[in-house]
Amino acid sequence: MRQPILYLLRDHINMFTDLAKDWASGPPSDWQRWVPMIYQAKLELHHYELNLYLNDHNIIDKPLLREENSKSTLGCDGHSSNTINSFAHCYWGKPQDGCDDPSQ
């Protein structure tokens, strides 16, 4: 992304935390239904600004008005990140076809 201006509110952090909890919750599925997956995310930012709001009690009525809010702005000429989450191996109590035995 070229010259993005990002606004991060406390509600955004709560949303991503709840999303991760929902994704990871529940009982484990049967090994017969397990599908190996590799998730890759690449992010490149050029000349970006990240605005973090610092208002009391996180009350933000008009987020785009600079006079009405306290915020900290972080900026940089460039940022690049590459994340790979591999779910290509499964580990259960006993080895199955396509699954590794964690005791070996």
Image: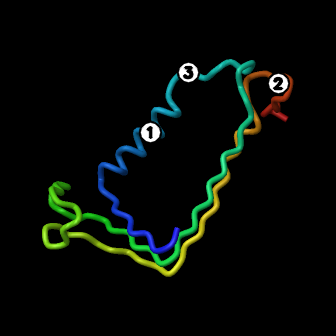
Q: Position of residue 90 (x, y in %)?
A: 74, 32
Give the number of marks. Answer: 3
At x 46% / y 74%, what residue is drawn?
3
Q: Nearer the viewer, mark 3 or mark 2?
A: 3
Which residue is more in the foreground, 74 or 57?
74
Quadrant assignment, res 96: top right
Label at residue 95: 2
Question: Which residue is the site of mark 3?
Answer: 27
Q: Are marks 3 and 2 in contact (CB under 8 Å)?
A: no
Question: Which residue is the site of mark 1?
Answer: 19
Q: Considering only order in the chain, which callout, 1 or 2, is on the residue closer to the N terminus?
A: 1
Circle 1: residue type? Leu
Quadrant occupied by the C terminus = top right
Q: Residues within 10 Å of mark 3 (few under 14, many from 20)?
A: few
In the image, 54: left or right of 2? left
Tag 1, which secondary structure?
helix
Tag 2, which secondary structure?
loop
